Image (tube, helix red, strand yellow):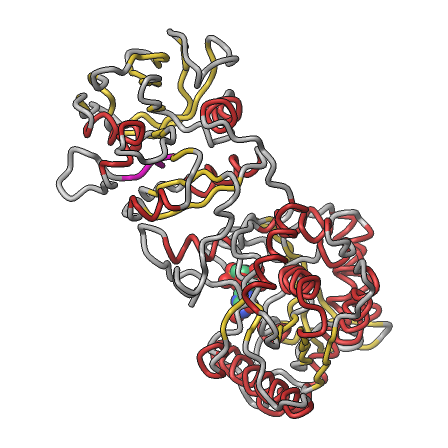
């Protein structure tokens, strides 16, 4: 789905880069985050990444991540041993190597030291004591707290290595400065490691000699240059969702190739109140914030009637998703063909912009293999193959908050940058049971109140998602002197980092009270509001 190396020529070859070989640690992404916080570009590749290809990218340094394996176990993960003899390589450029946890154990095992099995797995905070001169630990406190998570330990460092820090009777850090090989038994990337940031800074900036020049502005410059090169005179289409990723992706591409880009925004009938018109207006205005004032071409297609007709009588959530996905592709494809007809040469666009982010890319190259988790839904599944389109993925090197930073550099309004995620199948998965015009009206009105009150309380940007759900039950109520038998709305608000796990938000009672009271008073057809206090797992964020 994300294409292969040939389709995506390795970026940033002319700039500083750290390569992280992934041995399957749950913290590998964190290592990348920390290094990028130092304004140094880095990439995660599987530990099996071919050595020559890696050297072709001229990395300033290599990091071997942690991992769940034991180097003593048969079939445990390995990398090409040449990574460990870089400074002795035959004419190859030398790059310092830092092994973290499993990475250090692997170094030890491969270079003639001895790895021992521990009686027990050390897990959690540990006391770190520096005991020798070390470029890696320079400027750190003599004793500090570090985060450990390992079974095996270093019984004897390899020849040429000296121990520079301990934790109890365990070797916590060892290095061979001559060969520029460094190892840590603990995890510097984890926030619980007090001196972790300083240690990584020492490695990346001092030992590898990086300058920390990778900034959002630099990223945009580089992305614009690459897109121009990749696209040439060809035409490009981009599906906008109203969310931050597709808006930032489109703006970068627009900056690169201007009128060659056409964006398509589809009203699928299950958007929130006034969302179609608001998003169209907001995004159309984007053109005016560009330096050269060239407008972003946006085509709005209101296919709501068509989608709602297809959804009639459907109650199964997965079926709703399938229908919306398939219809979206059909509508988008038709729109792209119509565009081609208007074009003098009559040819179809050749490129499709997708807002793929780095976590998706890592998932697909990870040593653990592509995972089965929910994917970023900016990816217009199936389209590229069907229409024979090549992909432009300007954000595929970025994490979500880096996308926001880039968006800020491009001058996008905070309203777009801070928008909470909204699922592709929209309100259809928040209306339990059949989606009808009337039920959409109820949910839209209730949802608008939830978001409004959360914003008024100053909580909107602190919460991952907050919204209303329309339940498929009716309950008895009393209004004035009359008995009512009407709908129930649930409020959902969750904290999350990536949507994979989530905790319900302890909203202040006053916010809940105001929201509930406004919904029953202002939304016709609702007489009861409940608050969802379930976390994920075992629940999910959406109700369907
Ligand atoms: P769940 O409900 O699985 O949601 O805990 C996790 C995150 O994914 C979003 N979500 C979807 N997004 N198409 C989407 O584009 C979908 O079918 C879909 N289902 C869930 C959800 O809003 C949350 O952010």
Tell me where residue 110 appears, x and y as whole percent: 19, 30
Please say if 187 is above or below 541. above
Instruction: Decide if residue 480 is on the left or right side of residue 506.
Output: right
Q: Using the rendered image of the protein, determine whether residue 53 is visible from the camera's viewpoint.
A: yes
Residue 420 relative to residue 229: left or right: right
Q: Nearer the viewer, residue 384 or 28?
A: 384
Q: Where in the image, quadrant-wise, is ligand 1 located?
A: bottom right
Residue lying farthest left?
A: 74
Number of on-image labels: 0
Residue at the farthest right position = 480
x 57%, y 85%: residue: 348
Residue at image point 38% right, 34% down: 63
Q: Is residue 6 magenta?
A: no
Q: Quadrant of the N terminus?
A: bottom left
Q: At x 52% / y 56%, what residue is drawn?
A: 396
Please say whether residue 544 is visible from this viewpoint: no
How far across and down, in percent of the image, does residue 302 sit?
71, 85
Query: Which residue is located at x 73 percent, y 66 percent?
Result: 447
Front residue (pair 158, 320): 158
Task: Please determine whether, in this image, residue 288 is positioned above or below residue 533.
Answer: below
Residue 16 drawn at (x, y percent): 51, 38
Q: Quadrant of residue 449?
A: bottom right
Observer-nearest of 369 and 292: 292
What type of secondary structure mainly makes up the magenta span? loop
Pinpoint residue 420: horizontal percent, then vertical percent: 67, 57
Q: Magenta span covers which residues?
A: 63-68
């Amino acid at each position: 789905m994300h294409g292969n190396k040939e389709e995506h020529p390795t970026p940033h070859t002319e700039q500083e880069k750290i390569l992280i070989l992934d041995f399957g640690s749950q913290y590998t992404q964190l290592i990348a985050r920390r290094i990028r916080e130092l304004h140094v570009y880095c990439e995660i590749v599987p530990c099996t990444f071919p050595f020559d290809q890696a050297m072709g990218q001229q990395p300033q340094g290599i990091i071997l991540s942690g991992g769940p394996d034991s180097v003593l176990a048969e079939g445990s993960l390995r990398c090409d041993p040449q990574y460990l003899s870089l400074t002795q390589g035959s004419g190859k450029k030398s790059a310092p190597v830092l092994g973290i946890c499993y990475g250090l154990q692997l170094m030890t095992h491969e270079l003639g030291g001895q790895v021992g099995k521990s009686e027990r797995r050390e897990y959690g905070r540990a006391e770190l004591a520096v005991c020798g001169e070390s470029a890696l630990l320079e400027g750190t406190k003599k004793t500090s707290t570090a985060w450990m998570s390992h079974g095996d330990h270093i019984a004897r460092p390899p020849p040429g290595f000296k121990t520079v820090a301990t934790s109890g009777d365990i070797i916590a850090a060892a290095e061979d400065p001559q060969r520029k090989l460094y190892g840590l038994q603990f995890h510097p990337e984890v926030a619980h490691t007090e001196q972790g940031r300083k240690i990584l800074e020492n490695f990346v900036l001092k030992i590898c000699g990086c300058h920390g020049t990778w900034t959002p502005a630099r990223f945009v410059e580089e992305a614009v240059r690459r897109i121009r090169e990749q696209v040439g005179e060809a035409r490009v289409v981009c599906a906008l969702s109203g969310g931050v990723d597709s808006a930032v992706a489109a703006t970068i591409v627009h900056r690169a190739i201007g009128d060659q880009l056409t964006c398509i925004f589809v009203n699928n009938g299950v958007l929130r109140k006034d969302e179609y018109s608001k998003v169209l207006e907001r995004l159309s205005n984007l053109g005016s914030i560009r330096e050269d004032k060239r407008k972003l071409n946006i085509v709005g297609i209101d296919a709501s009637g068509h989608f709602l007709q297809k959804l009639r009588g459907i109650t199964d959530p997965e079926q709703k998703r399938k229908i919306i996905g398939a219809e979206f592709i059909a509508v988008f494809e038709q729109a792209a063909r119509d565009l081609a007809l208007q074009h003098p040469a009559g040819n179809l666009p050749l490129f499709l912009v997708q807002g793929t982010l780095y976590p998706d890319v890592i998932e697909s190259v990870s040593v653990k293999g592509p995972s089965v988790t929910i994917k970023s839904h900016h990816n217009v599944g199936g389209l590229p193959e069907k229409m024979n389109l090549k992909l432009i993925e300007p954000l595929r090197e970025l994490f979500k908050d880096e996308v926001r930073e880039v968006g800020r550099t491009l001058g996008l309004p905070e309203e777009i940058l801070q928008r909470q995620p909204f699922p592709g199948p929209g309100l259809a998965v928040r209306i339990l049971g059949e989606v009808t015009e009337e039920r959409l009206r109820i949910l839209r009105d209730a949802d608008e109140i939830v978001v409004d009150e959360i914003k008024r309380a100053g909580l909107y940007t602190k919460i991952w998602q907050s919204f209303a759900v329309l339940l498929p039950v009716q309950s008895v109520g009393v209004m004035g002197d009359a008995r009512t038998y009407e709908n129930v709305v649930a409020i959902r608000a969750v904290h999350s980092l990536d949507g994979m796990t989530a905790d319900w938000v302890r909203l202040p009672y006053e916010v809940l009270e105001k929201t509930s009271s406004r919904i029953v008073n202002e939304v016709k057809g609702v007489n009861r509001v409940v608050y969802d206090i379930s976390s994920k797992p075992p629940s999910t964020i959406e109700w369907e």
